[in-house]
Amino acid sequence: MTTSDSLPKNVLLGGLEGGGTKFVCAVGTGPGDIRDEIRFPTTTPEETLARAIAFFRQHKPAAIGIASFGPVDLNPASPSFGFITTTPKPGWAHTDVLGAFRRAFDLPLAFELDVNAAAIGEYTWVPENRALNSLVYYTIGTGIGAGVIVSGQIIHGLTHPEAGHVRLPHDWSRDPFAGICPFHGDCFEGLASGPALAARWGQAADSLPQEHVAWDLEAGYIAAALVNTILLLSPQRIVLGGGVMQQDHLFPLIRQKVKALLNGYVASPLFEGDLSGYIVPPSLGNRSGVLGALAIAQRLIQS
Ligand code: ADP
Ligand code: ZN
């Protein structure tokens, strides 16, 4: 992955984070120089993509990075490259997101999964992260997913990692909730996404008080998923973003549970103490995705 130090400084770039709930479009040269930014709700593909395209037409960036909610096809050799594929979101399955931009612009265009862009954003623009060679970014919101950077490169693979759908230990006597994933029931996302919390407890996740038993259970599921990721990929840092992680009391709980589950087995200077430098909130706040989209646009200009 490139570092921003070696990149041209004054090229106007476009970044789009297309989420299932809202779209964010920005133009600028980097996180410290955003010239314009808009947010609007995700409605139909036609209306929503047209709005994003109109924004970039107005600003004329030299390249655009497009980061979409998934699942998406990231294989440039595939006929459906740049499409959203099997989403249950009404109206959006098999939407040619990249194609809509290709028809509108004769510009370099990059395409990524939204959570991958968030990982790239955190990695590219945060100097402390760039000093590492691996990082995993989780979003825990409406859905759960993770972007994985290993040896400075985002992992695509067969399609892209689907870390929200891993299986976790599920103690049915403590948590009789069957989970809400339409594909797997009680996978990680089925048990621990924002809508899973709402379905289990009968109230919106953001209205559950801090002392509610929900949070200890939630931290347990997140910790179990993180332990698997730590053992499988050995990342040097894990960033936890998404709406549910705005409950910042979850961070110390998750760190304690990860430590307890690993029981001293993983030894690294990065893994010492209370893990407050290892399991961290996003440095870019809720803008990791759109700033990651800007980063992938920047790479197109340089190459
Ligand atoms: P999206 O996943 O659509 O990009 P978010 O990451 O904001 O958006 O996730 C939205 C989900 O996160 C919703 O299920 C919502 O209930 C939950 N959420 C948002 N804010 C909070 C909060 N402060 N505390 C707990 N849950 C929250
Ligand atoms: Zn699932």
Image: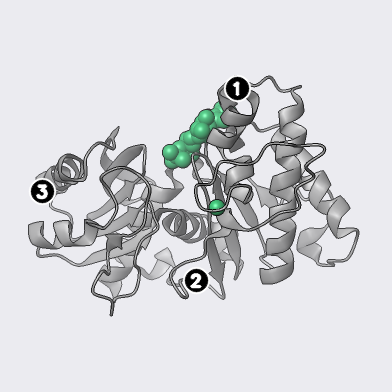
Q: Which residue is mark 2?
A: 155
Residues 225 and 272: in front is 225
Mark 2: few, some, or many residues within 10 Å (few <14, many ≥20)?
some
Residues 6 and 273: in front is 273
Residue 278 in view: no
**Ligand 1 closer than 8 Å to the CB at disc 1?**
no
Quadrant of the frame with the N terminus: bottom left
Amino acid bearing label 1: Gly
Q: Which mark is residue 152?
A: none
Query: Residues under labels 2 and 1: Cα distance?
Result: 37 Å
Above or below residue 241? Residue 206 is: above
Amino acid bearing label 2: Ile
SS label for mark 3: helix
Q: Which mark is residue 202?
A: 1
- Residue shown at the point (52%, 65%) measured from the top left: 161
SS label for mark 2: loop
- Residue shown at the point (33%, 37%) measured from the top left: 22
